[in-house]
Image: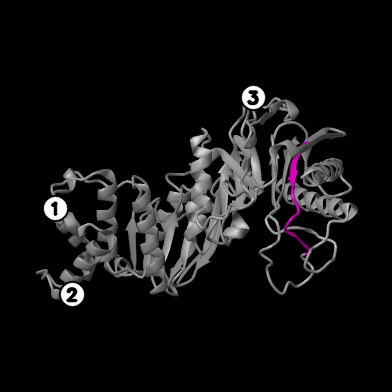
Amino acid sequence: MLQVNELSGGYGSGLIVRGVSFSVKQGELFGILGPNGSGKTTLLNMISGLTKPASGTIVVKEKPISTYALKELARVVAVLPQMTSSQFAYTVKETVSLGRYAHQTGFFKSWTDEDEAAVQEAMNQTGTSLFADKPLSALSGGERQRVFLAQALAQEPEILLLDEPTNHLDLSFQKDLLDLLKQMTSNGLTVISIFHDLNLASLYCDRLLLMKNGAVHAIGTAADIMKEQHIHDVYDTDVQKQPHPEVPKPQMSLLPARADVQPVEIGEELLEWHSDYISIRPPVPLKTLSSGVIGAGWGWRSAFVNRHVDKNYNLDNFEEEAANYFRERGFDLNETVGMMTAVKMDDVAYRRKVRDDVSVFVVTTAGVGNAVDVTRQRTSWKEKNKPGTINIWVFANGKLSEEAFVQGLMTATEAKAKALADAGVCDPETGTIATGTSTDSILIAATQRGAYQQFAGSITPLGIAIGLAVYESVTEALEKSSRRKAIR
């Protein structure tokens, strides 16, 4: 649909765009990224025919753009510039209707049914029909942006050029606009758009062009372009990549300068004991990966709670009940990891281990009435099994990579299984050594301060510390629980 070959140009005698080449297929949403001054708008102006290139070629539908008459090109290419003048007293509908100019012929222009239908469709698509009779000057910046998009769509182009189209739009209208553009590309419209927001571009674009100093720095899919090194090289800023939670596209987070990054130690002195729960409230939020009833998954948490419940606790709405319990005791659910266990709080065990430049603090409660061997198929669930849960908190005093978080979970789980094996804990149904219980929960939390820990496997300093602390605390917690049962 569009082919750009070794394009260079600018304004006056200076070159802003230097040797840019790329192609765009029909029905593609193609994004152009780059910092201010990188040549994005100049490139778009040359593609639209507003600026004549100094060298290189632009081919639209297999025909050089220089051979198109103005009206002919306008029937193929429509433009929504970054800043559009609105210093005239047209209504919204009159403004949108200007988009039909390229389709009118003859000395005396006539308004046709096709013109009216195109204008109405464009206003409906952009949500501007509700204020069709209002003067443009009475609209907000975001509303005017949508009006000028409707004007471009009324041209019924095959290629739509947009310069930062989400500027001035509220979040919901940004999404609505980009959803609309994405839908229109599935019907054959080709969209080429400059983006200021890297994450929006990644979410919606089929391919991206990343520019630096007027030249192509990289071109490809979002996975190709949204790499930390690329973004750092072009924008000269630190970012961290992570996946979008619902869409298979990468997203970038800015890493602000941190004034206070002094190491923080999580240890026994922070452990708070209550009759029905234990808690830790660290002095700083911790990066957390957990399977708690409250606060599961990734997050930054400022409170950690392990709650005792009666052995007969069995509610269909346990999540709601648990949330109310923690909330009533002053815990912010947005900042809390909450777990539950039938184990008495007096049977808590904890260990602190130091290896090289990292330390860990592990807190464990362990009951094994519902112990299971995960490697054996169970034929039924025995309700007579007594309740039991192994809850493990692992606090790492260091800066962990995401790989280290996941490896830490593996190491802790292996250590738990070894403690169960050495204690001779069996699955009551299969008679084989148990690997855990049916309701175990685990937490890995890191201060993200201090020495960087890339790995937490079983032979690394962090992994060794986790393995020893988990093994010893699970073993002690099992002994305490066993003694309590014997006393009964």
Which residue does the numbered mark 2 point to in the structure image?
114
Q: Check the image and report above or below for 255 versus 116.
A: above
Can you identify the residue that label 3 sits on? 260
- Specify which label sits upstream in the sequence, 3 or 2: 2
The magenta stretch spans which residues?
361-373
Secondary structure at badge 3 equals loop
The residues bearing labels 1 and 2 have C-alpha atoms spaced at a distance of 20 Å
Name the quadrant containing residue 253.
top right
Q: Residue furthest front?
A: 488
> Which residue is nearer to you in this view: 131 or 83?
131
Q: Secondary structure at mark 2?
A: helix
**Mark 1 or 2, nearer chain start:** 1
How far is the residue under mark 3 from the one under mark 2?
A: 64 Å
Q: Main secondary structure of the magenta part?
A: strand
Q: Which residue is mark 1?
A: 91
The residue type indicated by label 2 comes to Glu
Q: In front here: 127 or 319?
A: 319
Q: Residue at x 20, y 66 (%)?
A: 119
Q: Measuring 34% from the left and 69% from the top, which residue is drawn there?
A: 68
Q: Residues within 10 Å of mark 2 (few under 14, many from 20)?
A: few
Q: CA distance from mark 1 to mark 3?
A: 54 Å
Q: Earlier in the sequence, mark 1 or mark 3?
A: 1
Residue 134, placed above or below residue 468: below
- Judged from the image, the secondary structure of the residue bearing numbered disc 1 is loop
- In this rendering, position of residue 142 left or right of residue 343: left
Q: In the image, what residue occupies the spot 47% across and 48% down?
A: 197
Image label count = 3
Which residue is nearer to you in this view: 80 or 121? 121
Q: Vertically, is 444 above or below 183?
A: above
